[in-house]
Image (tube, rainbow, N blue to C red):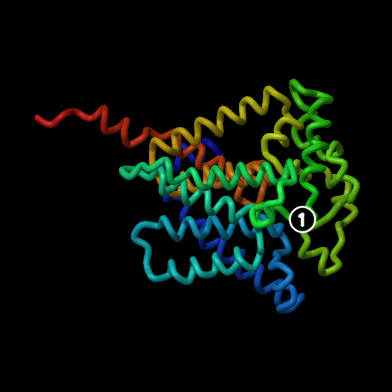
Amino acid sequence: MVAAGVYLQRSAALRPLLWGQLLIFASAWAYTLNTQGWAGVQERLGHPYYYVVSLGLVAVIALWITLYWKGGGWWRWPAGAAALATLLAAGSRGPIIALITGTLAALAFQQGRRRPWVLLPAVAIVLTATLSTRLDIPLQPVERLLNDQTSGREYVWRDAVQGWQTAPVGGVGPYQGGPYLTYLFKDGCQLTPTLQRNEISCPDTLSRWSSVWLIAHNAWLHWLLETGVIGTAGLLTVMGYGLWRATRQGDPLTLAVLFGYTAMNVVDVVIALPSQHFAELWWVLIGVTLRPAPERADATAQPRP
């Protein structure tokens, strides 16, 4: 995925993703309305293949693509409206934090108009939300924006830390952390909530693999659990370097995705492969940041006579 980003060189090459995302939104609305009616939409718009949070994140990505598509036509308005309606109907808190943080980062570091202080509100929201979850601070609006009251993320985080302590240097192994997340593992194999509402259970052939897609609902704790200190140090290096390169280049879409994903990784894991294309997008954009920054290119240009 990183090599693909190096080959593409520009985030604009990823624009065709929007057409597939619009098909995802259409199938989500069609499936929910056909199987559950408007009551299913009221409960939360779902998709048979995408989790509700994943559907919300894809809607956020579609909003960014339409927002930063230079030279786009009238179709951007209905495309953006479809993405916004899907995001609101999915009721996903994590993607909303990603949208706020990523959009503010694009405003703060876009090329030629750098205003880093614009990102301060997003940093404050993420930090406050983390504290409200860990310390049970009674800040209900922020807590509701980021967290599901019945998700039990604090228990999953505790399990991840305890599992990491069994192998702190190298972790328990890639895709092997599921059994250590006992809060989630005890429920057995489960499909998407939308399929569960339609009483479609997990096939027996998939039950043995149910632990593979269990996540610690925090990217860094998840990496600590499965790859230990060594792997997490590598991840932090890649993430930090990618964010730094993105701020130098000033491309709005790259900035929005990399910073937005970083914020959402506080309460979910949206960069673990494989996924339904959203995690792959992050790694591709890491590769895109490896191209020479405009500032560097200008600095090496020959002066005019």
Say which residue appears at 57% left-offset and 60% top-offset. 59
- Asked whether, in this view, residue 11 is left or right of residue 224, the answer is left
Residue furthest front as drawn: 138
Expressed as whole percent of the image width and height from the top left, the position of residue 32 reads 71, 72
Q: Position of residue 223 (x, y in %)?
A: 70, 33
Quadrant for residue 50, please give it.
bottom right
- Report if residue 269 is visible in the image: no
Image location of residue 143, percent across then percent down: 68, 52
Q: Image height check: is 44 above or below 173?
A: below
> For the residue marked with disc 1, what is the amino acid?
Gln
Q: Residue at x 59, y 44 (%)?
A: 263
Instruction: Please state which of residues 111 and 2 is positioned toward the viewer in this rendering.
Output: 111
Please name the residue shown 82% across and 40% down the image.
178
- Asked whether 119 or 212 is in front, the reply is 119
Judging by the rendered image, the residue that carries numbered circle 1 is 149
**As displayed, is residue 194 above or below residue 225?**
below
SS for tag 1?
loop
